[in-house]
């Protein structure tokens, strides 16, 4: 099964999602989007499949979004997409594509919604916080 993660290795959430996928028994294709960049059609497809707007996917912290004037409600979808192509850091992460589904996996537990199998329970994230209980239930908000 092909699973693609658009990943930033400096992001703890993104690292957690990569590890969850691997621990579930998959070998994801890891795309380090800060190096490869984005294309406008790629972003449009990801966002449409995830049922998100560019505004929904905009990274507002630790990004130049405010300095670029992208935080206002009057910023168009086209302007945001153009800015995201020019500045890949503006796209929140990680995005995961699996079986025709795409999710912005923040928090990292969101990835479980699209994985056909999960890591063995109990399961904790990189920081030791629980994600899946011993009974196999997802910890709320994880």
Image (cartoon, rainbow, N blue to C red):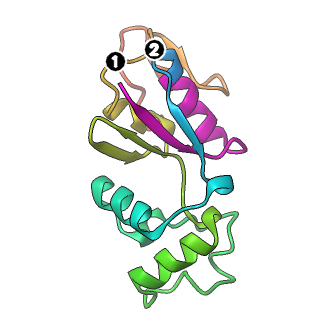
Residue 92 appears at what percent x and percent y? 54, 57
The quarter of the picture where the N terminus appears is top left
Does 26 sit above or below residue 8? above
Residue 23, compared with residue 109, is above or below; it is above
Q: Are marks 2 and 1 in contact (CB under 8 Å)?
A: yes
Q: Out of 47 and 67, give the one closest to the viewer.
A: 47
SS class, disc 1? loop
The residue where tag 1 is placed is: 117
Can you tell which of label 2 and label 1 is closer to the viewer?
2
- Left-right relation of 119 to 84: left
> Can residue 6 be found in the magenta stretch?
yes
Residue stretch rendered in magenta on the structure: 1-21
Q: CA distance from mark 2 to mark 1?
A: 8 Å
Query: Label 2, on which residue?
Result: 25
Asked whether the viewer can see residue 92, the reply is yes
Mark 2, Cα crowd under 10 Å, few <14 / some 14-19 / many 20+, is few
| Residue at 29% from the left image edge and 61% from the top image edge | 48
Give the x, y percent position of residue 106.
Answer: 49, 46
């Amino acid at each position: 099964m092909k699973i693609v993660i658009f990943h930033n290795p400096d992001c703890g959430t993104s690292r957690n999602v990569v590890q969850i996928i691997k621990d579930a028994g998959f070998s994801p294709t890891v795309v380090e989007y800060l190096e490869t960049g984005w294309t406008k059609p790629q972003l449009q497809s990801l966002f449409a499949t995830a049922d998100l707007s560019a505004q929904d996917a905009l990274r507002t912290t630790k990004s130049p979004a405010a300095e670029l004037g992208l935080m206002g409600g009057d910023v168009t979808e086209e302007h945001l997409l153009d800015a995201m192509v020019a500045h890949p850091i503006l796209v929140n992460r990680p995005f995961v594509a699996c079986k025709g589904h795409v999710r912005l996996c923040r928090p990292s537990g969101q990835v479980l919604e699209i994985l056909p199998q999960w890591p063995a329970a109990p399961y904790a994230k990189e920081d030791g916080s629980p994600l899946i209980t011993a009974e196999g239930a997802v910890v709320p908000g994880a």
